[in-house]
Amino acid sequence: ELIQLPSETISTARAQVIHNSADAAAETVDIWLNDQMLLDDFSFRTASPFVDVPAGEDIDISILPPNSMDTNGAIAKFTYNLMGNGKYILIASGIVSGSGYNPPEPFNIYVYDMAREMANSSDNSDVLVMHGSTDAPVVDVVEVAQGAGTIVDNIAYSEFAGYLELPTADYSLQIRNSAGTDVVAQFGAPLATLGLDGAAMAVVASGFLNPGNNSGGPAFGLYVALPSGGELVELPSEVISTA
């Protein structure tokens, strides 16, 4: 008589990786999952698609220079234990160089553990905001075209503001100081023009407010990562409105 063996269910999670480290020394990296290459020649301001990764067990994410053959000599290594059926966004940000950057926020991977691959409503665009600009202060994000007002209040470097469920429209976003009184920059967020109905996305503050203090690195901007991955979409800079 045949004995029915219990079937083993392999638990997985979904994860997306976003490269937001503006340090020239980390402009292109290899990313390994355990002892396998996950992302080869992964460039600054690009994202992976969401992929299945093992859950319920320790996994290692290693950041290597390009052309790596194994995980020896990693720039950084992080260990995670992800929940089965969970969805995660992992954003690499910070400085690996020993000098040339001020402030020298250390390289890290910042994890958001309630990621979405689509909006909760087909009429909305769900927007996750992450402050990933190492030299930018605590800021507010104020919407000035559709009357939405302050949509993110007092977000500091490395922090996430959970998903904003916004009706799909074309918005204008002002980056202001934490008091909300001084406008640092203004960007368009043309969610309707880009056809992002029903989409979920991560908007990352990226680059340097003062490139001169940061080895002439890339300037500050807002960049969008879609669940399909690829190059981040730069939100267009706008003339600051005073209305």
Image (cartoon, rainbow, N blue to C red):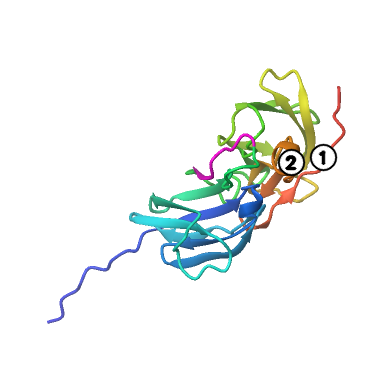
User: Which amino acid, mark 2?
Assistant: Gly
Judging depth in this view, the residue of 156 and 167 nearest the camera is 156
Q: What is the x, y in percent for residue 55?
A: 38, 56
Up the image or down, 99 lies above or below 139; here it is below
Task: Identify the magenta region.
Answer: 102-111
- Which residue is painted at 71% across and 36% down in the image? 213
- Residue lying furthest left: 1
Q: Is residue 204 magenta?
A: no
Q: Quadrant of the N terminus?
A: bottom left
Residue tagged 1: 237
Marks 1/2: CA distance? 8 Å
Q: Can residue 226 be seen in this view?
A: no
Position of residue 238 in the picture relative to residue 210 (left or right): right
Q: Which residue is drawn at 87% across and 33% down?
A: 239
Q: Mark 2 points at which residue?
A: 221
Q: What element carries label 1?
A: loop
Q: Which residue is drawn at 75% across and 51% down?
A: 195
Give whichever of discs 1 and 2 has the lower sequence position. Answer: 2
| Residue type of the residue flagged with mark 1 | Ser
Q: Label 2's element? A: strand
- In front here: 14 or 208? 208
Instruction: List the single residue furthest toward the front.
Output: 99
Image x and y of residue 44, in percent: 66, 54
Task: Characterize the local packing of mark 2: few (<14), some (14-19) or many (20 or more) Cα atoms within 10 angstroms.
Answer: some
Main SS of the magenta segment? loop
52 sits to left or right of 144: left
Q: Do the residues labelled 1 and 2 touch (CB within 8 Å)?
A: yes
Q: In which quarter of the image is residue 176?
A: top right
The residue closer to the viewer here, 200 or 25, is 25
Position of residue 152 relative to residue 36, above or below, is above
